[in-house]
Amino acid sequence: MQSELFKAESMAQPATQVGMSLQHSKAVKYAVNGEVLARQGAMVAFRGNLQFEVKSQGVGNFLRRAVTGEGVPLMAVKGQGEVWFAQAAADCFIVELQGNDALSVNGRNVLVFDPSIQYQISMVRGAGMFGGGLFNCVFTGQGKLALTCEGPPIVIPVTPQAPVMVDTDAVVGWSANLQTTINKSQSLGSMLRGGSGELFQLALSGQGFVIVQPSEGQPNPGQQKSGGLLGGLGG
């Protein structure tokens, strides 16, 4: 049989080493020899001897999830084999953390990560009750983390001279060392005239970067439209 379907970038190739790689821009492949952690329901295919189990994430994260009403349940994939992950045809990209790195991530954008990486649901300082809550997921350690994005990601450098304001529904993640506050970009007069729809943003300052998706995403069930920020990982 002949078809463009069988072009190299679409064909699954045998893994050459254990770990994470991009199958293409919409899917992540993971060659498992032990365990990997992923968003529940993100598996689209696998081969080999693999088991899928609900992952408990500790009392602290469980309580934070209960308080915020947010959460992305995780599963552990164990055994030997290959597994493919995707989420609603969103773009996928891989971030490699090295030692002292720390990345604060919106939980809705987490797809899969190495078990060597540690994370906790942490307060977004200075954000108050805006952005839909008080918590985000902070990843530290050494290993790879795959994230999803509605469209190609935009990475904006943040410097002390040039802080960046981001829509809380569009932000994917940022350097965890950045300082966070709420910025109001609309005058009272504009609000009284009906508003521009861009009343509050998350302001990031310091030295680092922020990742933004070219979409305001879909709020979680029961969540206000203005609150895409805080999809913490819970369990």
Image (tube, grey):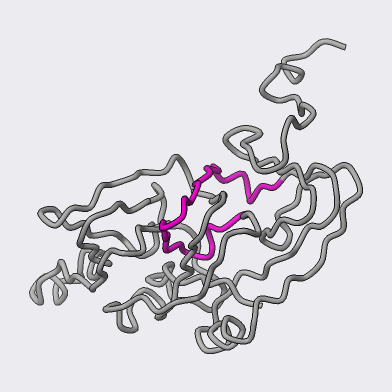
- Name the outermost residue toward the top: 2
Coordinates of residue 30 in the picture (x, y in percent): 71, 43
- Residue drawn at the location 61% of the way across and 55% of the way down: 111
Residue 157 part of the magenta segment = no
**Apparent side of residue 153 relative to residue 69 in the rendered image (left or right):** left
Left-right relation of 212 to 202: right
Q: Which residues are magenta?
A: 85-112
Name the residue: 14% across, 69% down: 186
Q: Looking at this rendering, what residue extends furthest in the front direction?
A: 99
Q: Give coordinates of residue 204: x percent, y percent.
A: 24, 63
| Vertical arrangement, residue 185 with respect to residue 150, above or below | below
Figure quadrant of residue 45: top right
Vertical side of 120 occupied by 69: above or below: below
* Front residue (pair 18, 73): 18
Q: Residue at x 54, y 68 (%)?
A: 119
The foreground one among 149 and 83 is 83
* Residue 162 placement (x, y as % from top left): 13, 53
Q: Is residue 3 above or below residue 78?
A: above
Q: Position of residue 38 (x, y in %)?
A: 68, 58
Would residue 199 be found to the left or right of residue 233 on screen?
A: left
Residue 136, quarter of the rendered image: bottom left
Q: Which residue is more in the foreground, 158 or 134?
A: 158
Q: Quadrant of residue 117?
A: bottom right
Q: For the point 18% across and 53% down, which residue is it?
A: 159
**Above or below — where is 23 with respect to 145?**
above
- Furthest-right residue in this view: 49
Quadrant holding the N terminus: top right
The tally of labels here is 0
